[in-house]
Amino acid sequence: MELPLENPLRIWYNLYIRISLCRFCGGKVKDMKKLIKNVTAITHSGELRGCIGINGKVIDYIGAAEPSGYDEVIDGKNAIAVPGFVNAHAHLPMVLFRGYAEDMALQPWLFGKIFPAEAKLTPELVKWSSRVAIAEMIAGGTTSSSDMYYFCDEIISAVLESGIKANISRGLSAFAETDVSKLVGFRETEELFEKFDGAGDGRVKIDACLHSEYTNNEAVCRAVADFALEKKAVLHVHVSETESEHCECIERHGLTPTAFLEKCGCFRSPVLAAHCVWVTDEDMAIMAANGASAAHNPSSNLKLGSGVARVTDMLAAGVNVCLGTDGCSSNNNTDMFTELHLASLCAKGFRRDPQALPVSQAFALANAAGAKAQGRDDTGVLEVGKRADIALVGTEAPHMHPTYSATVAVVQSARAADVRMTMVDGEVLYKDGEYKTLDVEEAIFEMEKLVDKTYR
């Protein structure tokens, strides 16, 4: 596939401009002040028609009037500004397995198809698939992701290149091994903290990780819990995704997965527990008391027949519930609009109560709650002083008309394809179909070439 001529020319031109600015500003590129005008913003305090001012990486104005003194003006006409979505549970390189294993329950899907396929992974496969996944997320308004996988150096390289934010954890499975120092995954986790925690001016955060209770043992769980506490890190783990996982843990330990992890000391750190479909009331109390977050993945849970998480019960118990897409092998896309819409509908249908999860509460699952789960208190809402992680959702399409409430439109009507612009830390990463930081054509071409060689 030949690359368009303008790509290298644009790269050199942008480099020339940045060098010139750097000289002009005494070695530092001056932060641009941007203004998004004529936009409907879903702010922390409600919907507002007006402008959003951005100074460098931070929102410095939200109001109805149009202020002066900004270097660049972005017209938000016919658009809704939302805090960028946080995909709180993902496996980015699993775009490689989109459609690879269908119509299967979790255990046969995982052990019969996915684990054998992952045994063939290479750094090159992860390099290009991560870029494809991130491009898909950026085009859908996602500005940050919590990822659990392998070959994390390659994932982080893609994150840094793209401009997105991410909490990265190396999936850890021990099975019979009890000495954590002998586990490659644990040694790689230590190296990730040394090399990358805080990279990209804080865009990259490293998390500790246990794949799950059923792929580890008590000794390893305790060691990882101690490590997470030492590093003051989030601990990312799959919890009670299926009924069989939940019940088999009780048979093994006399405890639910949540209670077992508590016994191992995991909840001394902020825990990001993925799925939580089968957690009990007692489990919810443990999570709430320890400030844990539950990453709700409705598409994945429905596709694998795992069930529907009791989101309203978790919220009522005080658990921070956020949203994730899981991997594209158990979802088929990274569309957070779909997760948002399904989360709303599943809560209402499960409780047989149309008021079970109000639209405003559902909306916060996709941004503010995800940012909290990642330990990022400077983003997740449109508010002066917060980082400018913003998506503009266009309202031109027929399915967005009429719009009585911007929040309702985003939760119940909008689609990833409606995203007009995605911005992270004040930098535009995607606008009107154009990627500003990634060569998406190259990433797709290289990934498809490797998929042909490895899996087809």
Image (tube, grey):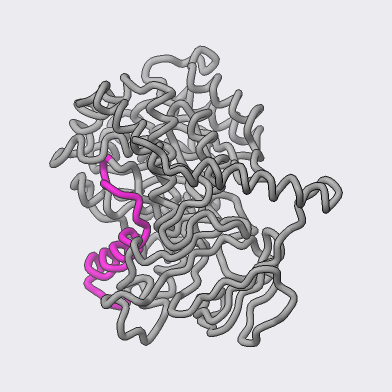
* Nearer-the-camera pick, 290 or 34: 34
The residue that appears at 25% across and 68% down in the rendered structure is 351
Residues shaded magenta: 329-355
In the image, residue 385 lies in the stretch drawn in magenta: no
In the image, residue 346 lies in the stretch drawn in magenta: yes
The residue that appears at 35% across and 50% down in the rendered structure is 334
Note whether 226 is above or below 362 in the view shown: above
Q: In this view, does 246 lie to the left or right of 376?
A: left
Residue 311 picture location, percent across and down: 35, 61
Q: In which quarter of the image is the N terminus?
A: top left
Note whether 317 is above or below 28 in the view shown: below
Residue that lies at the very extreme toward the right in this rendered image: 26
The residue that appears at 40% across and 68% down in the rendered structure is 362
Toward which corner of the image does residue 450 lie, by quadrant? Answer: top left
Q: Quadrant of the C terminus?
A: top left
Note whether 26 is above or below 352 in the view shown: above
Residue 408 picture location, percent across and down: 37, 77
Q: Can residue 317 be seen in this view?
A: no
Residue that lies at the very extreme toward the left in this rendered image: 103
Residue 324 picture location, percent across and down: 39, 51
The residue that appears at 23% across and 65% down in the rendered structure is 350
Residue 78 picture location, percent across and down: 43, 79
